Amino acid sequence: MSNINYSEKIPNNVNLNEDKTLQRALEHWQPGFLGWWQDVGPESSRGFDVYLRTAISVDPSGWAQFGYVKMPEYRWGIFLNQAEKERKIHFGDHLGEPAWQDVPGEHRANLRRIIVTQGDTEPASVEQQRHLGLTAPSLYDMRNLFQVNVEEGRHLWAMVYLLHRYFGRDGREEAEALLERRSGDANNPRILGAFNEKTPDWLSFFMFTYFTDRDGKYQLCALAESSFDPLARTTKFMLTEEAHHMFVGESGVSRIVQRTCEVMNQLKTDDPGKLRAAGVIDLPTIQRYLNFHFSVTIDLFGADQSSNAATFYSAGLKGRFEEGKRTDDHRLHGATYKVLDVVDGKLVEKEVPMLNALNEVLRDDYIKDSMAGVARWNKVIEKAGIPFRLQVPHKAFNRQIGTLAGVRVSPEGRVVSEAEWKANVDRWLPSEADRAYVASLMGRVVEPGKFANWIAAPAIGINRQPIDFEYVRFN
Ligand SMILES: [Fe+2]
Ligand SMILES: [Fe+2]
């Protein structure tokens, strides 16, 4: 168990001080990172004291320390899970060979691309969320936002470490480019679609951390299986932090649902107009936000059939979710999988080689997991005695990538005409009016223990602190 030396500029458990060249390269990158944080990180947060957890080791029993951190003095560190002794490759065509401690030349370009694509999402989400601190519905929520933001920053560090340490000059250039792309920028956007969308309000933020951070979980889990051992160890530790991000999303939406149900019962109405007049978010609007974030996020898994996915798997670069727990041959030659196709205006399943369908395999695992939290939101509605249920839309709904791109499909999974789509899109996806209404509710609440009218208080505080704890101190 290596502990972290906090006197070092960059906290780490990778013996950075034994590799002076690497240390200097990262110390050279660090000011660029801080400049990026200053430019497009959390707006007007400078000087706030925020009650944050900081990763200080990878020991499962005590990996984080809580305390006030003055923004932006968070200690972004580099942590890899402990190495497994004599780890073997456990899937693909190299199955049984020793895991790689260095990058094999023939896989260099693909591994670099995988790491850059993952790395790019981390700063992207910080950029997307940068204005939200100005409208936090409580100090508790503001603290959670900043916690997610600093940890996405640390995840960028994690990927940049791999680029600097294992990819030489191209790696250093990619690390610079990660600080140059900007979410939503027409000329130099982030790599993946969902990371160029806006996160303009807190309902979007909670949906994003529930659905899109969960995409992160599935990608990281697939990379945690990688034959490239440093990537596997890095992503394993990132998953430790990711759990909290998804908790923020799930509990955030749950608290909004809870508050809406309370007001529905007080006013004995399900009329969205009356509920909006009472200052809460009606359930059909929450459903439309869910439809949007779910559909945009499942596109992140890529095309349903992809020769790249097959190559990444067979080469041992990226496994399946929980590869080690599966009982097939872990090579998948000859195996098949069902993907969707459109034939004569109808969705049909067709059987294709599983190796080519591994994006779809991961997407389907993700969808199963997403549905579990939606069922928990429905429990809140059910408990309130309200006959409404949120639903995860059909996976063909509102897709932009793969076979289903451009096919108009209703949330129930019926192929519809362009005219029917246009007539209904404002019932299926957030309309301008929905977004304007949700935006009108946003306003910063700063009194400890107080919450905006449209969201319930959480059940418990952070790190066993009370709910009215001063999670953020403005100076
Ligand atoms: Fe992340
Ligand atoms: Fe995250």
Image (cartoon, rainbow, N blue to C red):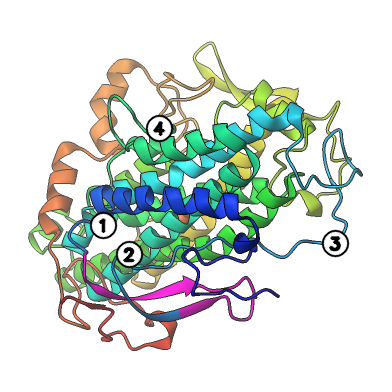
Quarter the N terminus occupies: bottom right
Which residue position holds label 3? 85
> Sequence order check: which comes first, mark 3 or mark 2?
3
Q: Which of the two marks, 4 or 3, is nearer to us in this view? A: 3
> Sequence order check: which comes first, mark 4 or mark 2?
2
Which label belongs to residue 193?
Answer: 4
Which residue position holds label 1? 42
> Sequence order check: which comes first, mark 4 or mark 3?
3
Point out residue 200 in the picture as x, y percentages from the top left corner: 22, 48
> Sequence order check: which comes first, mark 2 or mark 1?
1
> Would the CB of label 2 be found within 8 Å of ligand 2?
no
Marks 1 and 4 sit apart, C-alpha to C-alpha, by: 21 Å
Label 2 sits on what residue type? Phe
Q: Residue at x 27, y 41 (%)?
A: 198
Point out residue 231 in the picture as x, y percentages from the top left corner: 66, 49
- Tell me if 65 is positioned left or right of 315 in this view: left
User: What range of the chain is rendered magenta?
Assistant: 46-65
Which label belongs to residue 441?
Answer: none
Marks 1 and 3 sit apart, C-alpha to C-alpha, by: 41 Å
Label 3 sits on what residue type? Lys
Neighbourhood count class around disc 1 (C-alpha, 10 Å): few under 14, some 14–19, many 20 upward: many
Marks 4 and 3 sit apart, C-alpha to C-alpha, by: 39 Å
Q: Residue at x 29, y 24 (%)?
A: 187
Q: Which of the two marks, 4 or 2, is nearer to us in this view? A: 2
> Sequence order check: which comes first, mark 1 or mark 4?
1
Point out residue 20 in the picture as x, y percentages from the top left corner: 59, 55
Marks 3 and 2 sit apart, C-alpha to C-alpha, by: 36 Å
Element assignment for label 1: loop
Q: Residue at x 18, y 68 (%)?
A: 268
Label 1 sits on what residue type? Pro
Circles 2 and 1, Cβ within 8 Å, touching? The answer is yes
